[in-house]
């Protein structure tokens, strides 16, 4: 567009047609009369065209060849093209339209008809552009609202997780650290191609955020057991082992009202299976091997590692090297062997998180 006027390239090897066309259009448009398609492409390097009037029957490069070239170059592909032709055959018209022309005007053309065709097509182009801009704005608006909902969702998740951690007072920082451990495992699994087919179907950000709720079932466990200053009795431990099932029931109740939320699905699998063991000796269901959801197998490593490095009334905290050794000794018994192999490669990064070092 030049000085508020649309720019039209008029391409025709006939000088009379160029002169007549420019005379018809110059009052309303900035017109470039061009004698060949080759020269048109040279001009397009420096001129932004709003529409091209393109003759078909030209030497060297005809109109069909020119429009093919236009449509294969991204910077020119959206410029609307109207063919100018003395051809009147239906086959000729169909060929031009199939190549991407928006209209045909037969020669000799009348000024009112040519002006009206151009006006109509430029109007449609403008409407499409405005619609595209509206859709992009709408997408931005939807994304903004979605981001707000995700922020609220994460705030609620964090609040619930912090409530659990507050009640289970011996595990300060446990929620944050285990979430970061899961993050490390997942992204390194992806880099290594481990369980790639499963990870490709996951929303990783949502999965990692859902790890906060792995111990949500502890809300249903008595404070007398959660905060007992010594080691639990066998009976008390049996009660403690109910927390995965309590967590699953609580999350499934919420899921009834929001069945399509991935974070609830991930959180339910994590909460219900992170105490299962690869050899089938875990709880609550004694699942074995691949029958344990992958989310739970991931959380098992993160949860045990953090328990090892944390102080308890009944044990000293293990150092990170000891914790690494215990995790690796559990390969194939407590933990998924493939995940332990991933852990082995990033054990130093786990240790950094344990020491409060950002990664």
Image: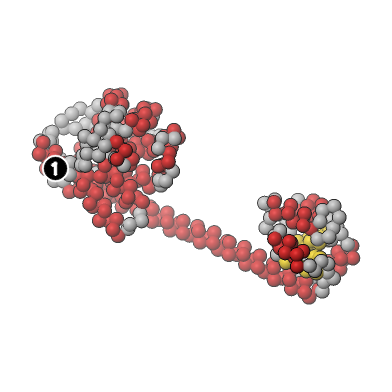
Name the residue at 21% across, 47% down: 245
Left or right of residue 246, residue 38 in this image: right
> Which one is nearer the viewer's eye here, 204 or 93?
93
Question: Can residue 90 be seen?
Answer: yes
- Residue 259 locus on image (x, y percent): 33, 57
Left or right of residue 221, residue 256 in this image: right
- Quick one: SS at disc 1? helix
Residues packed near mark 1 inside 10 Å, few (<14), some (14 to 19) or many (20 plus): some
- Residue 43 locus on image (x, y percent): 79, 53
Q: Quadrant of residue 236?
A: top left
- Residue 243 locus on image (x, y percent): 19, 44
Number of numbered markers: 1
> Quadrant where the C terminus lies?
top left
Whether 208 is drawn above or below 68: the answer is above
Left or right of residue 84, residue 318 in this image: left
| Residue that badge 1 annotates | 239
Name the residue at 39% across, 27% down: 345
- Residue 316 locus on image (x, y percent): 20, 27
> Which one is nearer the viewer's eye here, 284 or 230?
284
> Quadrant where the N terminus lies?
bottom right
Name the residue at 36% across, 56% down: 260
């Amino acid at each position: 567009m030049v000085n508020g006027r649309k720019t039209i390239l008029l391409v025709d090897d006939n000088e009379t047609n160029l002169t007549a066309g420019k005379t018809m259009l110059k009052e309303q448009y900035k017109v470039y009369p061009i004698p060949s398609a080759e020269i048109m492409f040279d001009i397009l390097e420096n001129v932004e065209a709003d529409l091209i009037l393109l003759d078909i029957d030209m030497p060297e490069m005809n109109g069909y060849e020119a429009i093919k070239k236009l449509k294969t170059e991204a910077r020119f592909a959206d410029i609307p093209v109207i063919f100018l032709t003395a051809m009147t055959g239906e086959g000729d018209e169909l060929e031009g339209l199939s190549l991407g022309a928006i209209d045909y005007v037969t020669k000799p053309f009348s000024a009112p008809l040519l002006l009206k065709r151009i006006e109509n097509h430029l109007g449609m182009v403008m409407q499409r552009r405005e619609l595209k801009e509206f859709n992009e704005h709408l997408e931005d608006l939807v994304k903004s609202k979605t981001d707000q909902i995700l922020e609220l969702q994460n705030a609620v998740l964090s609040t619930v997780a912090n409530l659990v951690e507050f009640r289970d007072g011996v595990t300060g920082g446990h929620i944050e650290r285990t979430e970061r451990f899961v993050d490390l495992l997942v992204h390194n699994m992806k880099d290594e191609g481990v369980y790639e087919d499963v990870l490709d179907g996951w929303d990783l950000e949502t999965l990692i955020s859902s790890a906060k709720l792995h111990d949500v079932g502890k809300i249903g466990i008595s404070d007398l057991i959660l905060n007992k200053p010594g080691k639990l009795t066998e009976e008390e431990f049996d009660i403690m082992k109910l927390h995965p099932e309590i967590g699953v029931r609580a999350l499934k109740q919420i899921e009834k009202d929001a069945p399509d939320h991935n974070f609830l699905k991930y959180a339910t699998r994590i909460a219900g299976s992170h105490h299962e063991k690869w050899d089938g000796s875990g709880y609550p269901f004694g699942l074995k091997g691949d029958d344990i959801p992958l989310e739970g197998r991931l959380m098992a490593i993160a949860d045990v590692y953090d328990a090892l490095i944390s102080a308890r009334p009944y044990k000293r905290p293990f150092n990170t090297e000891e914790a690494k050794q215990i995790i690796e000794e559990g390969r194939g018994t407590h933990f998924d062997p493939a995940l332990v192999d991933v852990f082995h490669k990033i054990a130093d990064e786990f240790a950094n998180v344990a020491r409060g070092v950002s990664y």
